[in-house]
Amino acid sequence: MKITSADFVVSAVAPNQYPTDGLPEIALVGRSNVGKSSLINKMLNRKALARTSSRPGKTQTLNYFRINDALYFVDFPGYGYAKVSKALKAQWGKMIETYLTKREQLQFVIQLVDIRHPPSKDDIAMYEWCKQIGLPTVVVATKGDKIARGRWQQHSKVIRQALGLRDGDTLLVFSSETGQGREELWAEIHNRLALKGEA
C-alpha cells in the first residue's frame, strides 16, 4: 500500500475523545516491548511517528494514527507489564474493554506476539477475549529476524496451537528490521477493509 499521509491524531482515554470522522479503525494489541511502535513505523514508512521506548508500560492511552485519510491504527497500552500499578492496570482494562466492545468503527484486531516465545497467559487471554466478543483477529509474530527463517513454521505452529487460532484468523511473520511481512500485512488489511483504490 502506498502511504501518502500518516499522522498521529490523538491520545484518547474515553469515548468522548475518539475521532468522529467515522473512518474504519484497526486496534493493535500486544505485550509491552513486543514491537507495536516499531511495526507501526515500518508499516507507515516513518522512522519515529510512533515512539519506541525501552521502558515497558510507557503507552497509557489509545493512540490514534490516521493513514491516507482512509483508516486509523489504534495503538493500545502494552499488557503484561508487572511494574505498572494495579490501579493503572484496572483503568487500562476498563478503557480497553469499553473500546473493544462498543466502538462501532473497530473492524478487527492486530495482535502482536513474539515469534521467539510461546504465547504468554496474557496473549492467550487477549485472543480469547477477542474470540468471545466476535472480533476478527490478525496475529502477527514479530521479531522474525531474530530466528532462522527455517524455524518460522515450527514457531508459528506453537503460536497457532497455543492461541487456538480460529478459521478465518490469519497468522503472519513480521520483522520491523527487514520489512518481512509488511506487504502481506497491508494486503490483509486491504482485503479486510476492501479499501478500493488504496493499494
Image: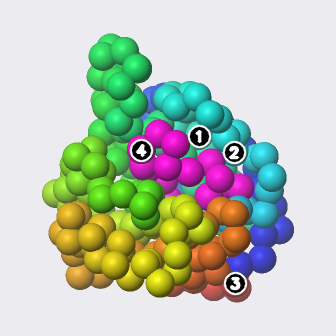
Q: Residue at x 83, y 68 (%)?
A: 4
Q: Is residue 100 visible?
A: yes
Residue 128: numbered disc? none
Q: Tags 3 and 4 in contact by the CB under 8 Å rule?
A: no
Whichever of labels 4 and 1 marks the residue nearer the N terminus, that label is 4
Q: Residue at x 80, y 56 (%)?
A: 46
> Helix, strand, or loop for circle 2?
loop
Question: Magenta residues?
Answer: 26-41
Which is more foreground, mark 3 or mark 2?
2
- Could you tell me residue 1's position as x and y percent? 71, 79
Q: Mark 3 to mark 1: distance in Å? A: 24 Å
Residue type pointed to by label 1: Asn
Q: Quadrant of residue 98?
A: top left
Residue under label 4: 31
Label 1 CA crowd tier, 10 Å (few <14, some 14–19, many 20+): many
Whichever of labels 3 and 4 marks the residue nearer the N terminus, that label is 4
Residue type pointed to by label 4: Arg
Residue under label 1: 63
Residue under label 2: 50
Q: Mark 3 to mark 4: distance in Å? A: 30 Å
Q: Mark 4 to mark 1: distance in Å? A: 16 Å
- Could you tell me residue 134's position as x and y percent? 23, 63
Which is more foreground, mark 1 or mark 2?
2
Whichever of labels 1 and 2 marks the residue nearer the N terminus, that label is 2
Q: Is residue 28 magenta?
A: yes
- Could you tell me residue 106's position as x and y percent? 43, 57
Residue under label 3: 199
Q: Mark 3 to mark 2: distance in Å? A: 22 Å
Q: Tags 1 and 2 in contact by the CB under 8 Å rule?
A: yes
